[in-house]
Amino acid sequence: MSSHLINFDPITPFEGKSPQFDETVFIDPSARLIGEVILEKEVSIWPFALLRADSDRIVVGERSVILDKVLIESPTGRPVIIERDVLISHGVILHGCIVREGAVVGIGAIVLDGAEVGKNSVIGSGSVVPPGMKVPEESLVLGIPGKVVKKLDEEAMRRSREQWSEAYEKSKKYLKIFGKTKW
């Protein structure tokens, strides 16, 4: 096997485009970022997450948290945009979609091409948001295919913010343990 095929660096340029981030970002050493991935301040990328932007860009907004084993891919003409203060839970797949500020995408959920998750909305664990679906702000989506089942009340939004806050605060601890991202 040729040694040029083995690359353990989590940061992989593709066709002249490289991931962009600053020293406030935490990237677990087991994660992988390929191509035009733009991470804004205080983003965290947890173990075994894969962000593949070899066809179009991926932008992750300030303080957003991308948990373990998340797959994010942006096909040609469908950049993935994740706004600020978003929690993307374990094992989520995001493909060519937009996730608005303050949203939570639950464990194992899938959000497909052209879908848009509204501000402060929650996509329930295991749900599938079909291509092109526009989820209104402050909505709960459940099922396969995903359907809006209710508008979130203040208590539900508070719990969502707590989930995000817990992960965000823990990411700052990881940044201290691992130190500034060296890639």
Image: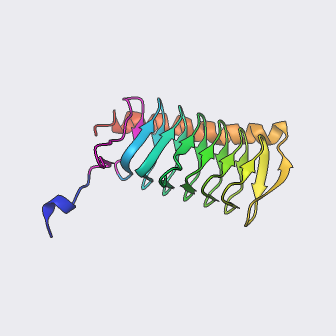
Above-or-below relation of 87 to 84: below
**Extreme bottom residue here?**
1
**Extreme left residue here?**
2
**Which residues are drawn in magenta?**
9-29
Above-or-below relation of 127 to 47: below
Residue 121, picture quadrant: top right
Q: Is 169 one of the magenta-colored residues?
A: no
Percent x, y of residue 155: 82, 39
Residue 103, picture quadrant: top right
Q: Quadrant of the C terminus?
A: top left
**Extreme front residue here?**
77
* Residue at x 65%, y 42% (from the top left corner): 163
Percent x, y of residue 151: 85, 45
Q: Which of 145 and 43 is in front in this view?
A: 145
- Whether residue 6 sits left or right of residue 48 in the image: it is left
Q: Which of 152 and 60 is in front in this view?
A: 60
Percent x, y of residue 92: 57, 57
Please say which color scheme the image uses: rainbow
Q: Is 16 one of the magenta-colored residues?
A: yes
Above-or-below relation of 128 to 154: below
* Residue at x 23%, y 56% (from the top left corner): 7
Q: Is the magenta stretch mostly helix, strand or loop?
A: loop
* Residue at x 61%, y 45% (from the top left corner): 98
Q: Which of 72 and 45 is in front in this view?
A: 72
Q: In which quarter of the image is the N terminus?
A: bottom left
Total number of numbered discs in the rendering: 0
- Whether residue 171 sits left or right of residue 155 in the image: it is left
Percent x, y of residue 68: 49, 54
